[in-house]
Image: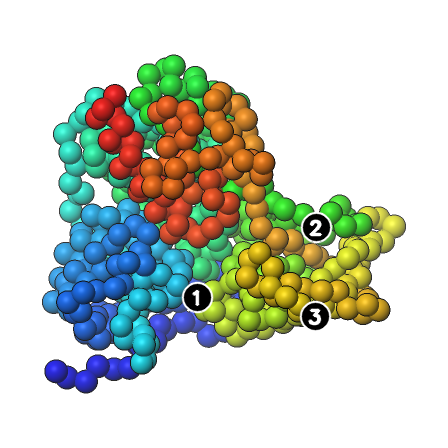
Amino acid sequence: MPQVKSTRHEMPTQDPKERRKNFDEVALGYDEETAVAEANRCLNCKKPKCMEGCPVEVPIPQFIQLIKERNFQGAIKKIKTKNSLPAVCGRVCPQENQCEKHCILGKKGEPVAIGRLERFVADYELTHGSEPAEKQPPTGKKVAVVGSGPAGLTAAGDLAKMGHQVTVFEALHVAGGVLMYGIPEFRLPKEIVQKEIEKIKDLGVEIKTNYVIGQLESVDELMEQGYDAVFIGTGAGLPYFMNIPGENLNGIYSANEFLTRTNLMKAYKFPEYLTPIRVGKRVAVIGAGNVAMDAARTALRLGAEESIIVYRRTEKEMPARREEIEHAREEGVKFELLTSPVEFHGDEHGNLTSMTCIKFQLGEPDASGRRRPVPVEGSEFEMKVDNVVLALGQGPNPLVPRTTKGLEITKKGNIVAEEETGATSKPGVFAGGDIVTGAATVIMAMGAGKKAARAIDEYLKNK
């Protein structure tokens, strides 16, 4: 057996000095030769472990084998038997904690770059086209999907393949949910998202935008109108705040508003797009997850001279992907660790000018398993800032849960649903993604949508 290269083939990227000035995609993707060479690193394990880590059950060894054979159309067809959004997953899925984590090559070297290969064949399809997906004969059953984020789109695509008539209701003016408003253009181009959505519409899925379920109509009213089942995938779009003095000053954004204005409403193209956004010379982003990295890198592209991640733990505890932290550092984002603001200050016009911060040291682990930050007495100091972006996580929007009769919800407002089926306390109503689990990854939401689609299909057969 020929010796396998221990390290994966690098993904070409834009130069950091250039990319911090534009919103073009940072990672440029594999070419055909590199993709085949990377695929050839796969050992064709008799008992492959990689699939154990994939929430949407992609047949990983099979699609990689097809890449080895240069059958790229076959590879994307194989992926799409399980995954309706491969170009999205190939870009934003944390493969290092899922499929690649189980790759046997990772024990002594680097795992096969499964995500990069998925992106390659997905992009190949977008360029060269593909055969229509196979569908079951029409069942005559109607399903409503509330929310067009990753959970809703996955459920809609799978249900359409099963032969059901699916209508997606989206509150915003463009379908895609967090894929459109929450992830920056330089990580996930919106053109890619819309092309993926068009593929789902080609299955016969109808998408109604500017349609706020809970205001225009309730879930109960949808069922009264003849929908046989409803899937709720409304995500977690309600930002958390710190509740400290000065938080309402001009120049302080939630990450949700900051990224939505930039990504979905294209504030970076003002005045071509009529959504302005104010970014000063010095921007502080509070938090250290993927959303925080996105906000800090976006601030640089919007003209900030200095963008700083302010986080109350150390880099070891940061929840963001390593790749995102490295890209942020390459682009010039600074890190103020073991630090958190306790008060914001403004001028006579109500504009943010600075914040009082304190330093922390790490104590014993808390419920999350990370060491608890403990304030250091007498460590207060002032940090001058023109903007602050609060990237502290998000909770469920209460609109749909509160307007649906008989739906059990938690104290935090999340819908209670069975893990394996998405079934809720209300017959015929299923839910999945962040509205159930709280804020999580795109791929976990997709996995929930896939499980719910199977359960809905079974429910409709027995109805």
From the viewer's perspective, is 120 left or right of 224? Answer: left
Residue at image location 49% in from the left, 20% down from the top: 405
Quadrant where the N terminus is found in the figure? bottom left
Q: Which residue is mark 2?
A: 242
Of labels 3 and 1, earlier in sequence is 1
- In the picture as drawn, the residue positioned furthest to the top comes out as 224
From the viewer's perspective, is 288 left or right of 253? Answer: left
Q: Which residue is mark 3?
A: 361
Residue at image location 47% in from the left, 69% down from the top: 322
Q: Nearer the viewer, residue 165 or 364?
A: 364
Q: Residues within 10 Å of mark 1 (few under 14, many from 20)?
A: many
- In the picture as drawn, the residue positioned furthest to the front comes out as 364
Going by the numbered disc 2, the residue's amino acid type is Met
Q: Percent from the top left, x then y, of residue 463?
A: 25, 21
Q: Percent from the top left, x then y, of residue 245?
A: 80, 50
Q: Percent from the top left, x then y, of residue 174?
A: 44, 38
Q: Which residue is mark 1?
A: 26
Given this view, does label 1 or label 2 mark the residue nearer the observer? 2
Going by the numbered disc 1, the residue's amino acid type is Val
Quarter of image, res 123: bottom left
Given this view, does label 2 or label 3 mark the residue nearer the observer? 3
Question: In 3D space, how far apart are the residues under numbered discs 1 and 2 (Cα atoms)?
Answer: 32 Å
Question: In 3D space, how far apart are the residues under numbered discs 2 and 3 (Cα atoms)?
Answer: 19 Å
Given this view, does label 3 or label 1 mark the residue nearer the observer? 3
Of labels 2 and 3, earlier in sequence is 2
Is any part of residue 208 visible from this angle?
no
Q: Nearer the viewer, residue 415 or 261?
A: 415
Q: Secondary structure at mark 3?
A: strand
Going by the numbered disc 3, the residue's amino acid type is Gln
From the viewer's perspective, is 150 left or right of 158? Answer: right
Q: Residues within 10 Å of mark 3 (few under 14, many from 20)?
A: some
